[in-house]
Amino acid sequence: MDFDLTQEQQAIRDMVRDLARKEIAPRAREWDEAETFPAELFGRLGELGMLGVLIPEEYGGAGLGYVEYVAILEEIGAADGSVGLGVAAHNSLCTNHIYTFGSEEQRRTWLPKLATGEWMGAWGLTEPLAGSDAGGTRTTARRDGDSWVLDGEKTFITHASVGKVAVVMARSQPEKEKHHGISAFIVPLDAPGVAPGKKESKLGMRASDTATLVMEDCRIPAENLLGEEGDGFIQAMKILDGGRISIAALALGIARGALDTALAYAPVREQFGRPLAANQMIRAKLADMGTLVEAARLLTYKAAVLKDRGQTVTQESSMAKVFASEAAVKVAEEAIQILGGYGYTRDYPVERAWRDAKLCTIGEGTSEIQRLVIARELLRGAQGTV
């Protein structure tokens, strides 16, 4: 389904689909097994505007909307979840945070190199003791003259060891309660006192760079504060509303890629003298898989359309993310089942899709947190109608 895409949007999607099939899918297994971040590929994606999708052209971006962004991520995710995750994290989190809350000077200083892919961006919210409970942030920031000095550790940070700049949340007002007193800072990753720590060896998304980010007396200019002091947590939650659309789109792509493999395999694989696709149980699986993919697509595009209209999408983005991510796990698992023993080997991409999909149920807010958010928004809406 094209979800009523314009001709221009279809052209963008088709261009990315062609790129993904020719330049990403053939090397996805290699990158996964080597746990290697494909820096050269990301340079190419930057040249094509895919690392500044949401950023206006005046700052070096492509000047596109969330509908185009979803289409791009679905196609990349269908080829390789790791690459899709890198594109999503760079666009939605670091780059978009600076664009959304940065001053004009900050935008012009940082965005051109991020939006063109010259620099990769990281985003630091999660800590060893502050995952779903982001209000438990312990990284500190203290003002010292014309500088801020940061101390602490961020964990599970995408692009921590390959990035050039990060947006980091730190507690600058320790006297305030948990969700208050947290501020956002632009941290150049070549600044004194900041360095990548342990690189994670993961179940899936193995070609996505994931590491800790350690700050010890990390000194940055005072003007690197993003927005108002103490607004960092609020900023982060707003950024995650858009980020969850990107994870939903990524999950949608992973699911569709697994379904495509199963649809190609079932008609040609013979058992008991006939193709697998002639078996009613296999047909039922394919029907359920296709339905899950289509439902995930509708929820994800709905959130994208509303976001492009400037509406608040807290509920819609959470619904899209929880459904699409869990659908991706299910579809990939059923694809493995349809392929049988071959599905369990690395000769086919469905086992990688299964491993990659699981991260989508965890990153940028677990499925459990999404359900809490959805219930809160539903109850708030119900109370408003009483």
Image (tube, helix red, strand yellow):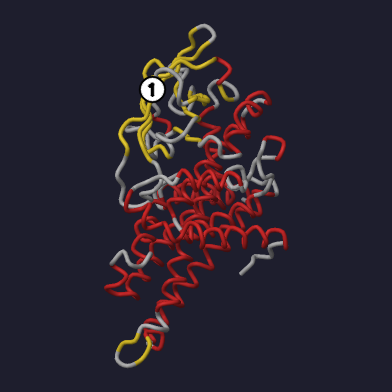
* Rendered position, 309 above or below 143: below
Query: In the rendered image, which residue does mark 1 sit on?
Result: 215
| Viewport quadrant of the N terminus | bottom right
- Between 70 and 200, the one lying in front of the other is 200
- Between 115 and 243, the one lying in front of the other is 115
* Rendered position, 169 above or below 311: above
Q: Secondary structure at mark 1?
A: strand
Residue 189, image x and y in percent? 46, 26
User: Hey, what amino acid is under mark 1?
Assistant: Met
Left or right: residue 359 compared with residue 24: left
Residue 26, image x and y in percent? 44, 61
Q: What residue sits 50% from the left and 35% below the top?
A: 121
- Between 114 and 5, the one lying in front of the other is 114
Q: Quadrant of residue 156?
A: top left
- Between 280 and 354, the one lying in front of the other is 354
Q: What residue sits 48% from the left and 68% below the top?
A: 292
* Rendered position, 70 above or below 177: below
Q: Residue furthest bottom?
A: 273
